[in-house]
Image (cartoon, coloured by chain):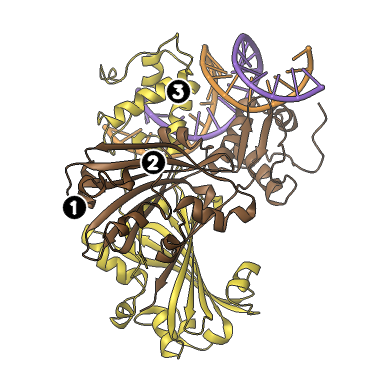
Chain colours: A yellow, B brown, C orange, D purple
Amino acid sequence: MPPLRSGVLGALDPTSDRAVFRQIADQVREAIDKGRFKEGDKLPSETELVEHYGVSRMTVRNSLSVFQGEGLVVSEHGKGVFVRPRPLVRRLASDRFARRHREQGKAAFTGETEAEAEAAGSRPEVDSLEIKEERPTRDMATRLGGPRRVLARRRRYLLDGRPVEFAASYLPLDLARNTPIAQPNPGPGGIYARLEELGHQLDHFNEELRARMPTPDETKTLRMASGIPVIHLIRTAYDTQGRALEVCDIVMAADAYVLSYQLPAT
Amino acid sequence: MPPLRSGVLGALDPTSDRAVFRQIADQVREAIDKGRFKEGDKLPSETELVEHYGVSRMTVRNSLSVFQGEGLVVSEHGKGVFVRPRPLVRRLASDRFARRHREQGKAAFTGETEAEAEAAGSRPEVDSLEIKEERPTRDMATRLGGPRRVLARRRRYLLDGRPVEFAASYLPLDLARNTPIAQPNPGPGGIYARLEELGHQLDHFNEELRARMPTPDETKTLRMASGIPVIHLIRTAYDTQGRALEVCDIVMAADAYVLSYQLPAT
DNA sequence: CAGTGGTCTAGACCACTGC
DNA sequence: CAGTGGTCTAGACCACTGT
């Protein structure tokens, strides 16, 4: 085992009130911030840190867990702890549901991803599609104006093989049953294009947006690293009469997205 | 010390592959989910859990740290570990910068908060205001069309005494110098109203939105509990010629906000 | 004061990785 | 195989809270 690169990490201040594990964390953070450890670089191993600082291993692990919680590092069993590389990012613009996109046959995810992220080398995929008729939750029923049953379309989106988004669309069953919307592939332009063909003229969407840490379920389906939040987005599509046609419940790995909205000043 | 309420937490499965601390976490989580521990309730103390499960204290602490990372609990030194109560939430609607609000003399934070959250008993405050002329960062300069110097307005927002948002506005200096915009209180309707009075007709805003874990600085200024992400919002205000008049860089405690946007379907 | 969580030690065995 | 991180023990002393 090679000795720790000298000068990268300093010594502890025994007179300081700051807890030892925080002092270690501070020093490692500074080294990362100053670029002495770059994205993807391996940090010194726990054993090296133990020897460098003369503390017990639990103390070192405690330091590193600080970074885990911030999403700054990822640890790989048997390999080491690495500075987290910044992943591919999808930009979602607020005109992504403009009719002109539907008319060009673009679907919500693949269409736009091809347009906006594929340049960066991404590979958009859809996954584990599930289409079911079911009873809506209380919240969904309220948002949709109280239907007794809904058509649910659930699917997962991948970017470059990585799951980045899990979405569930709900439509009143009377609207969607026995239409292309109930098919796995609803055709060019996605279900919004089909809704318009069925005579429901889309007027606007409302997106309600929160950020929080993932639930254990979400951690699993999105293979979330620790210290990465999710963006929870609930979109409702309205027709020109103000009727809610669809509610889409989306959970996104926050490190894979930048959302962009245009607001009128008037 | 009273014995643990029987039935609330079960026993470990020694044949399971699942790590002991995860099994404990699973059981505590289930108890919370099923409402056996409600918001604000104190969880069993570490000592109680040690005795109930017959494991070492570090193992119990490891279990609890899982919930810390999820923002599900808060621990208070000397008191105990508590199920995190859901805080007050501010709803930000996408019409919050509509001219009619400015004309009614509402400012961005207090005006709208009064309108939308005070019903829930909130108390909006602004804090630690700082107004400086400075050199913009590279990113800010780009967004603002390359001014050499900017006016920076920094302030913190509190809700019910809790810091929930930290914002920094940047305006090209030639636009803002020696105007009410450079004053601590820019007057009714905020700086956007002043910009329009100065002849800059606002056309639209763009909001760019990310979610991530807070930096140590942000943790301090917003007094963030662990396991709570921040929403990072960068808003740019444009005039009718497409010139960027202002960029506002906002960091919000994610558990205090729901954002809502209206998108056109056309 | 007793009870709580916060920090820390000095070990141990395990599972995973790469050579 | 050696090196890595993952889990776990059985203690210790401390700082903070409430009575």
Q: Which mark is residue B235?
A: none
Q: Chain of mark 3?
A: A
* 3D distance between C-alphas at marks 2 and 1: 25 Å
Viewer-proximal residue among A103 and B46: A103
| Residue B6 drawn at (x, y percent) | 82, 40
- The answer as to whether the residues below labels 1 and 3 share one chain is no
Tell whether A163 sits left or right of B1. Answer: left
Q: Chain of mark 2?
A: B
Q: Which mark is residue A22?
A: 3
Tell me where residue A124 sits by quadrant: bottom left
| Residue A193 drawn at (x, y percent) | 39, 83
Q: Is residue A134 above or below residue A251?
A: below
State which quarter of the image contains the C terminus of chain B.
bottom left
**Location of mark 1 (residue):** B145
**Location of mark 2 (residue):** B184
Provide the secondary structure element on which disc 2 rests: loop
Q: Amino acid at mark 2?
A: Pro
Q: Chain of mark 1?
A: B
Which mark is in front, 2 or 1?
Answer: 2
| Residue A55 drawn at (x, y percent) | 45, 15
Which mark is in front, 3 or 2?
Answer: 2
Dot 3 crowding, Cα within 10 Å, few <14, some 14–19, many 20+: some
Q: Amino acid at mark 1?
A: Gly
Instruction: Tell me whether circle 2 and circle 1 mark residues in contact (CB < 8 Å).
Output: no
* 3D distance between C-alphas at marks 1 and 3: 41 Å
Dot 1 crowding, Cα within 10 Å, few <14, some 14–19, many 20+: few
Of mark 2 and mark 1, the one earlier in the sequence is 1
State which quarter of the image contains the N terminus of chain B.
top right
Provide the secondary structure element on which disc 1 rests: loop
| Residue B226 drawn at (x, y percent) | 52, 37
Q: Amino acid at mark 3?
A: Arg
